[in-house]
Image: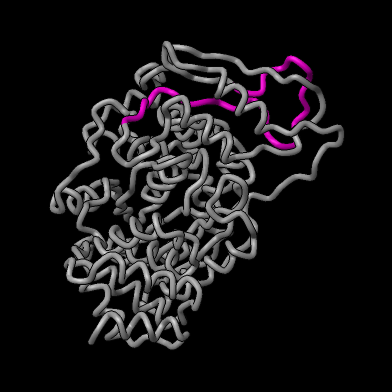
């Protein structure tokens, strides 16, 4: 078998066999196939596409290219949740303890943030003492004892995907639905989940800007999961404005804690209810999402969700007092208000620009090795549909001393569109696949 023949076959629009896909992934992972040949194949896939069977084979080949987490020693159905990334998305911090408090084991591997979207691991590290690294035995033991563990993804989980993603990033082949779907699902499958709930973001702050593309991606990932024997559900959700009000690591932890107390932003609470209900149904705890939602609302109301979050923090070496003493989370040195220059209603918020403003303050990283400041970010004071007066505060910048604020201030102002007419209420969940 030769890589040249595989490239030529796909360039002609023909379907690759399972053996050909395995050959290409195995050879590239072992550095036996050069970047230039894989780049050529990626471009052929970009233009010619992949069939559902090819996507499934690619996903499993990448999942099997490195270590696979064995969760069989954890009783029950293990349900994982994955978001395609957005601004202010702190749902894992809420869903993990919430679903665990309902008796569903949450064994989760998460990543760090890159660019304008945040990472769960960075947020957890804002909690004093919190350990994001556990060996496999400790990880399994904690899930069995506490029902939840969240750790940083290991380097040898789907290494083929890591190599392919880096190459896609420099060959203009990132925005290919078959390649995105296989990338996401290979990591979820390698992480050992029995069932997967996908949160596919669409809008100005998401990777997918168009609803049609988001639904296509959702359908492709659900099909992959089903084909490889994983129960899979996807929700397509709105990211035309940031989720909640807080953007930035410590700030998002505070908002997650408020949500676990039943005091969080409406859109964040609503999304967590939808995603959590799907997780409970897939785990077999409830027969339908209506019953599941009732259960989750009760868990929050009775304080069980917050108690589980504290237990989770203690298990991973963190200080649970952050739940009652916000000052234990790293505070920003400067809080700078941004005021509106006009009056009316907020009709649009460019979520990507808000994310980039937080990144410019040090809350996000431009490269994987860049350092970030866990204390900085911004807190929105107005969301879409709310009225605003001239000179009223639209956001607060949380910054470090000596930080240049004018650029971030301009970005926030430019992200807001103020109009005379109140816009229609937006639904957070746009559809289910």
Residue 34 shown in magenta: no
Q: Is residue 110 left or right of residue 216?
A: left
> In the figure, 43 relative to 174: above or below?
below
Q: Is residue 196 visible?
A: yes
> In the figure, 50 relative to 175: above or below?
below
Q: Is residue 294 left or right of residue 171?
A: right
Q: Is residue 134 left or right of residue 255?
A: left
Q: Residue at x 51, y 14 (%)?
A: 335
**Colour mapping:** one colour
Q: Residue at x 53, y 71 (%)?
A: 219
The prevailing secondary structure element of the residues shown in magenta is loop
> In the figure, 407 relative to 121: above or below?
above
Q: Identify the image quadrant of the N terminus.
A: bottom left
Percent coordinates x, y for residue 186 in the rendering: 33, 66
Magenta span? 371-395
Q: Residue at x 20, y 65 (%)?
A: 66
Q: Identify the image quadrant of the C terminus.
A: bottom right
Q: Nearer the viewer, residue 355 or 140?
A: 355
Q: Is residue 93 visible?
A: no
Q: Is residue 283 left or right of residue 246?
A: left
Percent coordinates x, y for residue 49 in the rendering: 49, 77
Percent coordinates x, y for residue 277 in the rendering: 51, 56
Q: Residue at x 33, y 23 (%)?
A: 321
């Amino acid at each position: 078998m030769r890589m040249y023949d595989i490239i030529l076959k796909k360039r002609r629009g023909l379907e690759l066999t399972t053996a050909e896909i395995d050959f290409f992934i195995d050879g590239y992972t072992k550095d036996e196939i050069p970047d230039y040949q894989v780049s050529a194949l990626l471009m052929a896939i970009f233009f010619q596409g992949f069939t559902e069977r090819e996507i499934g084979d690619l996903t499993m080949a990448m999942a099997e290219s490195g270590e696979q987490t064995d969760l069989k020693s954890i009783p029950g159905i293990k349900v994982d949740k994955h978001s395609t990334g957005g601004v202010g998305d702190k749902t894992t911090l809420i869903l993990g303890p919430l679903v665990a408090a309902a008796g569903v084991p949450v064994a989760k591997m998460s990543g760090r943030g890159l660019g304008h979207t945040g990472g769960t691991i960075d947020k957890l590290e804002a909690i004093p003492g919190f350990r994001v690294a556990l060996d496999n035995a400790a990880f399994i033991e904690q899930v069995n004892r506490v029902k939840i563990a969240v750790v940083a993804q290991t380097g040898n989980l789907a290494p083929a995907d890591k190599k392919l993603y880096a190459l896609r990033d420099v060959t203009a082949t990132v925005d290919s639905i078959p390649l995105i779907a296989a990338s996401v699902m290979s990591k979820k499958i390698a992480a050992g989940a029995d069932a997967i709930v996908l949160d596919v973001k669409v809008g100005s702050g998401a990777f997918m800007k168009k609803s049609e593309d988001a639904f296509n991606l959702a359908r492709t990932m659900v099909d992959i999961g089903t084909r490889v024997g994983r129960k899979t559900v996807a929700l397509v959700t709105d990211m035309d404005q940031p989720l909640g009000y807080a953007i930035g690591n410590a700030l998002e932890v505070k908002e997650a804690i408020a949500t676990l107390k039943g005091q969080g932003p409406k859109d964040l609470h609503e999304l967590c209810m939808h995603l959590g209900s799907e997780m409970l149904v897939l785990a077999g705890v409830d027969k339908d999402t209506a019953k599941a939602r009732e259960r989750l609302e009760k868990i929050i109301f009775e304080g069980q969700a917050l108690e589980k979050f504290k237990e989770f923090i203690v298990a991973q070496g963190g200080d649970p007092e952050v739940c009652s003493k916000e000052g234990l989370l790293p505070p920003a040195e400067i809080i700078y208000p941004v005021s509106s220059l006009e009056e009316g209603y907020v009709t649009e918020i460019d979520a990507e620009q808000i994310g980039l403003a937080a990144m410019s303050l040090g809350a996000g990283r431009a490269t994987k090795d860049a350092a970030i400041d866990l204390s900085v970010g911004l807190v929105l004071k107005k969301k879409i549909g709310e009225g605003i007066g001239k000179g009223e505060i639209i956001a607060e910048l949380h910054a470090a001393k000596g930080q240049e604020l004018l650029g971030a201030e301009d970005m926030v102002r430019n992200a807001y569109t103020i109009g005379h007419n109140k816009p229609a209420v937006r639904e957070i969940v746009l559809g289910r696949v």
